[in-house]
Amino acid sequence: MRRTVRLLSPVNMAAPRSFALWGYCDRGWSRLMPGCRLPGFRSCWPGCPLGARLLSQEKRATETHFGFETVSEEEKGGKVYQVFESVAKKYDVMNDMMSLGIHRIWKDLLLWKMRPFPGTQLLDVAGGTGDIAFRFLNYVQAQYRGKQKRQLRAQQNLSWEEIAQKYQNEEDSLGGSHVMICDINKEMLKIGKQKASAQGYKAGLAWVLGDAEELPFDEDKFDVYTIAFGIRNVTHIDRALQEAHRVLKPGGRFLCLEFSQVNNPLVSRLYDLYSFQVIPVLGEVIAGDWKSYQYLVESIRQFPPQEEFKEMIEDAGFQKVTYESLTSGIVAIHSGFKL
């Protein structure tokens, strides 16, 4: 795996960190104090022109965007957390309203592209409300049930009790598949757990509070990593991609569903009009939150276009990286493999 050398000290992604939960400390970093010398570097600190320039560059480098607003990296994490804490209860309703229900088709397409099989171990990052996880469980269960029916038809001498027993084992209906939902926002996870309980999802499902930039999992653990409409909210996208590569098994697959760059000029104009004039109003009327949905609209425009994001995925060490634009490029599915 290619490693990216970080020249600046890491900055927390969000205010409510999961360090206490996971006992995690940032790998390989230590703070340099005035007077420390490194081989091949001049010792120069504030007070000399070079030191002042370096501090000025560091200040600029730690600034980022929160929608169209320029904020510090640390501040962005807290603001994004507040956005999703605020919208969590109306998140699914607003997704239906904003996309006119089309987000459901996009997520189905993500699963069809994944084509998981019984036994697949999935990590769904930023998946708090469970949309991808539930689709995964349904897909794998359907695959396993189909295989089971074919096997039962081939075995003519089974008793009714033996057949019934096979259908009653809920764990077996997934063929050993499991999905881990990881989200940094407690409120989003809370809503997801409530949905799972209401819809009867129990087996093959786990919920973890964690940061996409510092995943609380061992290396080479998952077959598939998914992130849907989440990566554009991460402060350091490159670190999130590196973490995705780290936790995937060799041969594992990365799949990202995210808003992207519209490739049709007419659709682009209509999309912008709808995004900026309608979506914040819907946010105010349905969720009582104009500002959060204004940010979400602006964050889409700050996300890299398809080709640039493809290059970022390759820089994280993934190979055979491809993408498919959907609905004139309003969203795109990027795919890559850890080989």
Image (cartoon, rainbow, N blue to C red):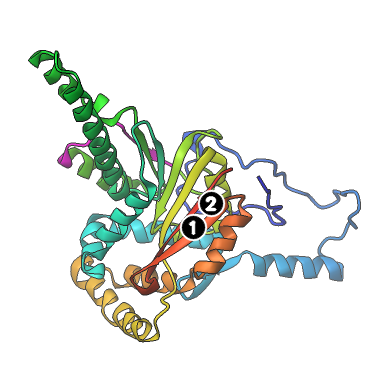
Dot 2 amino acid type: Ala
**Looking at the image, which residue is at 54% across and 58% down?**
237
**Looking at the image, which residue is at 35% across and 33% down?**
178
Q: Earlier in the sequence, mark 1 or mark 2?
A: 1
Q: Which of marks 1 and 2 is in front?
A: 2
Q: Is residue 164 magenta?
A: no
User: Is the C-beta separation of discs 1 and 2 under 8 Å?
Assistant: yes
Q: What stretch is highlighted in magenta?
A: 198-209
Q: In this view, does 6 lie above or below 47?
A: above
Residue labelled with disc 2: 240
Q: Can residue 153 be seen in this view?
A: yes
**Looking at the image, which residue is at 50% across and 70% down?**
305
Residue 313 at what x, y percent from top left?
Answer: 56, 56
Badge 2 local density, few (<14 within 10 Å), some, or many (20+)? many
Q: Is residue 236 visible?
A: no
Q: Is residue 208 magenta?
A: yes
**Looking at the image, which residue is at 54% across and 62% down?**
310
Specify whether 27 is left or right of 54.
left
Residue 317 at what x, y percent from top left?
Answer: 62, 50
Residue 123 at what x, y percent from top left?
Answer: 42, 41
Q: Distance between the residues labelled 1 and 2?
A: 7 Å
Dot 1 amino acid type: Val
Q: What element carries label 2?
A: helix
Q: In this view, does 167 lie above or below 249?
A: above
Query: Which of 119/96 is in front?
Result: 119
Query: Which of 337/309 is in front?
Result: 337
- Quadrant of residue 72 in the image? bottom right
Residue labelled with disc 1: 234
Q: Split into 4 quadrants, where in the image is the N terminus?
A: top right
Q: Is mark 1 on a helix, strand or loop?
A: loop
Query: Which of 93/85 is in front?
Result: 93
Query: Which of 331/155 is in front?
Result: 155
